[in-house]
Image: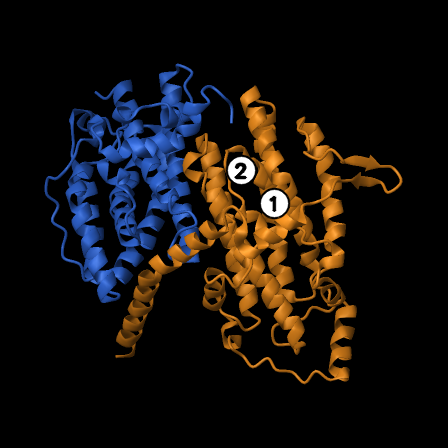
Amino acid sequence: MYSQGLIGADGRTVEDEEFLTRFQARIDDEQKIEPNDEMPEGYRRTLVRQIGQHAHSEIVGMLPEGNWVTRAPSLRRKASLLAKVQDEGGHGLYLYSAAETLGVSREQMTEELIDGTAKYSSIFNYPTLSWADIGTIGWLVDGAAIMNQIPLCRCSYGPYARAMIRICKEESFHQRQGYEIVMTLAQGSPAQKAMAQESLNRFWQPVLMMFGPPDGESRNTDQSVKWKIKRFTNDELRQKFVDATVPQAEYLGLTIPDPDLKWNEQRQGYDFGPIDWDEFWRVVKGNGPMNRERVAARRKAWDEGAWVREAALAHAAKRQAQAAE
Amino acid sequence: MAGRDDLLALLLRIGDDHLILGHRLSEWCGHAPMLEEDLALPNMALDLIGTARMCYGYAAEIEGDGRSEDDYAFLRDGTDFRHILMVERPNGDFAFTILRQFLFAAYMHPVWDGLTGSTDARLADHAGKAVKEMAYHVRHSGEWVIRLGDGTEESARRMMAALDELAPYIGEMFESDETAQRLVTAGLLADPDAVRATFDGTVSRTFAMAKLPSLDVTAGISGGRTGRHGEVLGHLLAEMQFMQRAYPGQTW
């Protein structure tokens, strides 16, 4: 609970040249920045935004997968899906705690999520329409998340980097679990294989969009790389992901839905076709297939839970008063 | 003397109680009043589903007709389920869900405690694990019963409403029949009077702290142990069994 003293803290700094140079020197020296250290306001704001978005993505991400918990096809799958969604909630909790060390509260961040001002990963604005989507999400969505997150274990901000180490371990377990679901389908009946292929067809492009807009259009990249919050650009990570995923799809006997996909011997990587960035921006701006339902579900849980949270506080106050008597 | 059929009946009663309640809890996944409960409710659901899997797996071995744990969960119709009616009731609000969890755990904790000394080694072995899980469920849900019962006016009103809704379903937990009597005589199942005494103690201590009225268990609605369920069960099964019904005979 060491973070609590920092909530609403006055983080104002005198950001003269000397201060910024001293800060950058610490970053360049690979020193971790800790909650009580001086930091530029822009650094703090970037982290609050990024960690907050990351936490919200974990929480909203519980919904598309939770959508299949009650319909999982076997007891083993039901239990492992439930445990997985529970892990995502746990990730949300560590991340909100990491963000709290920067002076924002979980309540504030939640309010921003449900009033639509905070963003979360656009992938969760797509629906889960078949059981195969649960496999695809584990394999590709968690796979892409790992690609994004492994470098974050070395992020310059200590609490975020440490949270990411544990999260990445669990995500890589989820990814293997997802791949195993897709493999079971790919090796199953023709109907199961078709289910897996149809799911891959729907998710492939949105998954590539998870790495964010192309480098030329990404506003936040340069400064974040300099501050070692980010270590690779969006396009670099996207390429790594494609290169790692194509052989996995081949092994499964599934076809990646991209006629332009081919190995580039010279670059030692896969070339791939254009991404529909108009769709990406449409979804980010609120018009994806599930944006409204996702935010509405979070708002409903928050609003309907208000009396529970109030009761817990009221009871704690009564206990405290009794103890003081 | 309790025979093979009695043991099977017991496994289905316990297995179905745990599966159906676990399924209901899993419906909360991602929709709880706070993040901590988004972790705690699936945790309890996982314990319950784990026990159901043990029961069905063991039943399948005894029957020896090639059925699997999943066949018991996904390919039986409602009238073949043997759970008590309380566990199939729709979730309602958080007060209803948490009070139902508390009542069930307060009942199952002494049942499992008794089963640790069961003459059936397999059940006794699982009971060692389940008794710890149920102790946690009693503690976690019991703390919420107290917080909500003695929280705000609204939370107290909701707890009272939940108690009114659940009261008619409590008696069924303590009903006995010839099968249960043979199981007790054979040392497979705990003595129902001891279970009841422990349940009463747990409930009265918690209710006193929650400022809830003392519980008066009277004969109410029952029929679950003979497969006479509420209309809600069919809908629960339609959802839970969808994949196995739509794509029969596949490996998942």
Return the residue at label 2.
A134
Q: Position of residue A200 (x, y in %)?
A: 61, 35
Q: Name the residue located 21 percent from the left edge and 29 percent from the top edge.
A: B225
Three-letter code for the amino acid on which mark 1 is drawn = Asp
Q: Which of A254 and B129 is in front in this view?
A: A254
Three-letter code for the amino acid on which mark 2 is drawn = Ile
Q: From what the image shows, is residue B30 above or below residue B10?
A: below
- Name the chain under label 2: A
The reply to whether callout 2 and callout 1 are in contact (CB within 8 Å) is: no
Mark 2, other Cα within 10 Å: few <14 / some 14–19 / many ≥20: many
Q: Position of residue B66 (x, y in %)?
A: 42, 16
Q: From what the image shows, is residue B98 above or below residue B122?
A: below
Chain B: its colour in the image is blue
Q: How many marks?
A: 2
Mark 1, other Cα within 10 Å: few <14 / some 14–19 / many ≥20: many
N-terminal of the two: label 2 or label 1? 2
Q: Position of residue A181 (x, y in %)?
A: 56, 32
Label 1 secondary element: helix
Q: Name the residue located 67 percent from the left edge and 57 percent from the top edge.
A: A153
Q: Where is residue B203 in the image (x, y as percent from the top left)?
A: 21, 52
- Name the chain under label 1: A
Label 2 secondary element: helix
Q: In this view, does B13 lie to the left or right of A47?
A: left
Give the letter of the orange chain: A
Return the residue at label 1.
A142
Q: Nearer the viewer, residue A90 or B155?
A: B155
Which label was assigned to residue A320?
Answer: none
Note whether residue A82 is visible.
Answer: yes
Q: Name the residue located 67 percent from the left edge and 49 percent from the top edge.
A: A277
Q: Name the residue located 42 percent from the left edge and 26 percent from the top edge.
A: B70
- State which quarter of the image contains the C terminus of chain A: bottom left
